[in-house]
Image (spheres, helix red, strand yellow):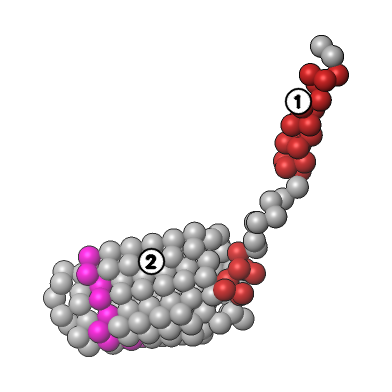
């Protein structure tokens, strides 16, 4: 083989090596993206402390927020459809008019949270603490409330998992 035949192959190999060693220029830190745009779809925010963020009207559909700290936050009208909030701390947060359809809230702390007019259709709330939460006009159609702590929960015109109003 002569050097003319090796040239394009070596060039391609060099380019591939550089791409493997350097992070993609278009990869954005999910926290930075969320802070700058109020949107982070399909993001991994597991274990993040988001209490310093303004998440009102944020779009976090299909994101992993398992174990995240969202306590005491203004989460009004946040979109969390199909999000993973397993073990997340949402205690004392205001989630008025939020969308959590098909979200996983297994073992989450929603104590004293305002969940007025929230969509929790098909959400998994197994073992979640809803102690003292406001569920006025909340839609829980087909939600799983197995072993959820419902002590002191305010139900008013709430659509329960079986479709009945309470």
The residue at the point 64 percent across, 61 percent down is 28
What residue is disc 2 on? 81
Residue 1, above or below 160: above
Report how many numbered discs are placed on residues in the image. Answer: 2
Q: On the rendered structure, is 82 left or right of 19?
A: left
Q: Badge 1, how many Cα within 10 Å: few under 14, some, many 20+? A: few
Residue 90 rendering spot, x and y as whole percentages: 47, 77
Element type where label 2 sits in the image:
loop
The residue at the point 31 percent across, 71 percent down is 120
Residue most extreme to the left: 164
Q: Badge 2, how many Cα within 10 Å: few under 14, some, many 20+? A: many
> Considering only order in the chain, which callout, 2 or 1, is on the residue closer to the N terminus?
1
Residue most extreme to the right: 3
What residue is disc 1 on? 9
- Residue 39's tag is none
Q: On the rendered structure, is 134 left or right of 108?
A: left
Q: Nearer the viewer, mark 1 or mark 2?
A: 1
Q: On the rendered structure, is 151 left or right of 62?
A: left
Element type where label 1 sits in the image:
helix
Is 130 in front, or is 156?
A: 156
Residue 108 picture quarter: bottom left
The residue at the point 40 percent across, 81 percent down is 77
Residue 124 rendering spot, x and y as whole percentages: 33, 63
Whole-angstrom CA distance, mark 1 to mark 2, is: 47 Å
Q: Magenta part mainly helix, strand or loop?
A: loop
Residue 30 picture quarter: bottom right
Write the start and end of the magenta stretch as one range. Answer: 131-142
The residue at the point 65 percent across, 56 percent down is 26
Residue 48 rendering spot, x and y as whole percentages: 59, 68
Is 162 in front, or is 118?
A: 118
Q: Is residue 141 visible?
A: yes
């Amino acid at each position: 083989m002569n050097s003319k035949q090796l040239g394009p192959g070596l060039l391609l190999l060099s380019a591939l090596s550089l791409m493997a060693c350097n992070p993609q220029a278009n990869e954005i830190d999910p926290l930075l993206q969320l802070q700058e745009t109020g949107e982070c779809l399909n993001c991994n925010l597991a274990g993040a402390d988001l209490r310093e963020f303004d998440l009102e009207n944020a779009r976090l559909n299909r994101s992993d927020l398992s174990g995240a700290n969202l306590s005491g936050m203004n989460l009004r009208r946040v979109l969390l459809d199909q999000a993973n909030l397993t073990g997340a701390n949402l205690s004392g947060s205001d989630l008025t008019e939020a969308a959590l359809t098909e979200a996983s809230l297994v073992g989450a702390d929603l104590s004293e949270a305002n969940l007025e007019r929230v969509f929790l259709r098909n959400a998994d709330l197994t073992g979640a603490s809803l102690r003292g939460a406001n569920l006025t006009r909340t839609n829980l159609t087909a939600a799983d409330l197995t072993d959820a702590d419902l002590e002191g929960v305010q139900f008013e015109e709430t659509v329960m998992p079986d479709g009945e109003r309470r």
